[in-house]
Amino acid sequence: MSGDVVVDTSLAISWVLTEAQSPLALALLRSWQQADVRILVPALFASEISSALLKRRRQGLITASQAQAGIATLLGNVTVRPIDTAIAGRALEIADGLGMWKAYDSLYLALAEREGCPYWTADERFFNVAAGQFPAVRWLGAYAPP
């Protein structure tokens, strides 16, 4: 395995929080690291991970220092790509074509399309909606570690 992948927050957040899918997400991350795979995310990722960590902080599930460490870890494992007009426009087309009300997930898919690489998500609902039309979409739950 080599090259690039795009991951979304639903998958990446499991690298720093204890969630049901964390063991699988961490195994996938380790396989990418061993294969020198570059992990790409759109700039929206920083806002999404900050919000997810803040939510856990407000729920009393993590400390402020754990949230800060989570941000550092997550941003340290990815390459952030800017959201340009082409990606934003394509994300709108994708979301509209899938009948979605928001384009967040579609930004990741638009980036994966542009980069010609797989898009990995832990969001089974989005996977189920998108996978039929977009074969680049991969669901974490279908990953089988070697």
Image: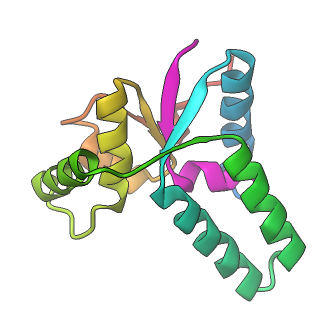
Up the image or down, 134 lies above or below 107; here it is above
Q: Relative to the observer, which residue lies in front, 71 or 26?
A: 71
Up the image or down, 67 lies above or below 138; here it is below
Q: Position of residue 19 (x, y in %)?
A: 71, 58
**Colouring method of the image:** rainbow
> Quadrant location of the C terminus?
top right
Q: Position of residue 114 (x, y in %)?
A: 30, 32
Whether residue 15 can be seen here: no
Residue 15 on the magenta span: yes
Q: Residue at x 54, y 55 (%)?
A: 10
Q: Residue at x 57, y 34 (%)?
A: 39
Q: Position of residue 66 (x, y in %)?
A: 86, 68
Whether residue 135 can be seen here: yes
What's the magenta region?
1-16
Q: Position of residue 142 (x, y in %)?
A: 50, 33
Q: Residue at x 50, y 49 (%)?
A: 8
Residue 47 on the magenta span: no
Q: Residue at x 50, y 30 (%)?
A: 5
Q: Relative to the observer, which residue lies in front, 5 or 134?
A: 5
* Residue located farthest toward the top when viewing the structure as drawn: 1
Is 41 left or right of 61, judged from the image as shown? left
Picture mark count: 0
Up the image or down, 47 lies above or below 142; here it is below
Is 64 left or right of 54, judged from the image as shown? right
Is 10 left or right of 66, judged from the image as shown? left
